[in-house]
Amino acid sequence: MTMNKLLFLILSSTLLLGGCWDVTEPQRMYYINAVGVDFEDDKYKVYLQIINFADVARSQQSGGDVEPAEVGYAEGKTIEEAIYKLYRSSDQEIFWGHMRYLIFSERAMENERSIPVIDTFIRFRETRYHIWVYCTTDPINDLMLVTPILRNSMTASKLSNPISTTKQLTFVQPINLRELIIGLNEPSHEIGIPYVKIMKGWENDEGEMEETTFSGIGILSKNGIKGFIKDSSARGNQWMNEETSRGEVTFKLEGGERDYLTVDIDNLNLEVKPIVNKNDQVEFEIDIKIQGTLNGFKGKITTDEVRKNIAQQIEKEVKETYQEGLKLDADVYRLSEYLYRSNVKVWKKIEHNGKIPLTEDSISKINVDVNKINPGRKTFDETIEE
């Protein structure tokens, strides 16, 4: 075979090779970062937050000239109908593979309305299970247009990447779609979803700014939203979650006109023990082990004094959040699941719709063990005594 014939054969065979001619170029697609869902007048209201991927590369450089996200809006008898209406108004193909979070309004979680929405996103082939889920009573459109601090990219916002902030303070543990589904399918068939609201506490050269903040939890069941536990009433939730990286307690030192003291809390270890009595009545003993760090204090204090006040404050917060949950008929600490894992026979006897009856006396004991107090760096004459 001559060289010309061989070259012709090779070139001809390349025509039979498959190519990427049917693949849409990345710059010719819109990327969904978030979806907001509301419900009014028997219709789903859907908000799609679209980001410009050219801005993502600049997200590492704070203060850049980043364009804000755009939010599309449509209504439909189902969430799918609303999304298809948005497809009609889009200039480019919409890609869902980078969707980071889903946020519900209170109305969208009532009367099982959230279930078909969740089902839509877990069935769609482009979306993932690791989509963060939030709830709010603020206008969803306003929340989705809040620009991150220093005008960072929307992919660097608190709602898009909540883990980065929880390492410093875990007031509310983020929940993704996978964890939400597990929580609804296992006792007590309820789960706490981070409650988000808009706050005004930052400023720049142009004036006051708005930012999002985690302000509590919303209790979602298969039958709909049970209610919200907000602000200080939700503080006990962080001490009943082993995923808590760091928290704080503030208390007033006893005696005279002594000041308030704030202690950093970390290395949390939690154990919940169901105690079954003779008549199949169940009580729960809670053991919380933590470490504390003092960053600033005035005068002379002892480790025993600090330990005592920390234990009292954490016990108080755990009880308060639990009582707020009882007002909503919610098993806020998922005590039903602890019994289910420990003694399924007793659980089957007393459960109703996956949840066991709970009262204020169901938590019989809360033991808070502060096994270490770190005084931090010493810069003044004040001391902490053993």
Image (cartoon, rainbow, N blue to C red):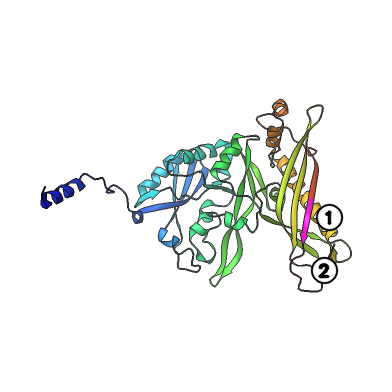
Which residue position is annotated with label 1?
308
Q: Nearer the viewer, residue 341 or 177?
A: 341
**Splitting the image into 4 quarters, where does residue 187 fall?**
top right
The secondary element bearing badge 2 is classed as loop
Which residue position is annotated with label 2?
383
Q: Residues within 10 Å of mark 2 (few under 14, many from 20)?
A: some
Spatial separation of the CA atoms under disc 2 and disc 1: 18 Å
Residue 21 is tagged as none
The secondary element bearing badge 1 is classed as helix
Range of residues picked out in magenta: 369-377
Q: Residue type at mark 2?
A: Thr
From the top left corner, tell me how far across and down residue 30 is, in percent. 39, 53
Q: Is residue 143 above or below residue 353?
A: below
From the top left corner, tell me how far across and down residue 68 is, in percent. 46, 61
Q: Tell me what residue is drawn at x 38 percent, y 49 percent.
A: 94
Q: Tell me what residue is drawn at x 49 percent, y 57 percent.
A: 155
